[in-house]
């Protein structure tokens, strides 16, 4: 358990980069969906 509570900086960096990449992808997807919805109307 202590390992999970205090992960290494490398692990934290990888997790942060993964979240950032996922957030960017999600933003692009929502923007495309929003544009598609507005053009359909």
Image: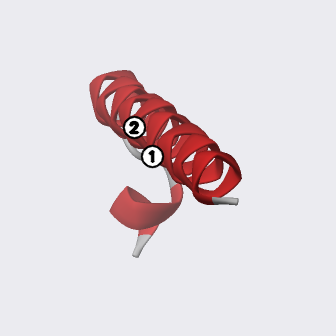
The secondary element bearing badge 2 is classed as helix
Q: Is residue 36 left or right of residue 9?
A: right
Could you say whether the residue bearing mark 1 is in a helix, strand or loop? helix
What's the mark number on residue 25? Answer: 2
In this rendering, position of residue 8 left or right of residue 16? left
Quarter of the image for the C terminus: give it: bottom right
Which residue is at 62% across, 58% downward? 37
CA neighbours of label 2 inside 10 A, class few (<14), some (14 to 19), many (20+): few
Question: Quarter-wise, where is residue 11 in the image?
Answer: top left
Measured as percent of width and height from the top left, residue 39 is found at 61, 46
Residue 29: which numbered mark, if any?
1
**Residue 20 location, x and y as percent?**
48, 30
Cβ–Cβ under 8 Å for marks 1 and 2: yes
User: Is residue 10 depicted above or below 6 in this figure?
Assistant: above
- The image position of residue 1, as x and y in percent, is 40, 76
Task: Identify the residue at horizontal 39%, vertical 24% (top origin).
Answer: 13
Q: Nearer the viewer, mark 1 or mark 2?
A: 1
């Amino acid at each position: 358990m202590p390992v999970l509570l205090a992960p290494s900086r490398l692990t934290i960096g990888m997790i942060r980069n993964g979240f950032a990449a996922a957030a960017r992808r999600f933003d692009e997807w929502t923007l495309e969906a929003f544009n598609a919805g507005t053009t359909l109307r």
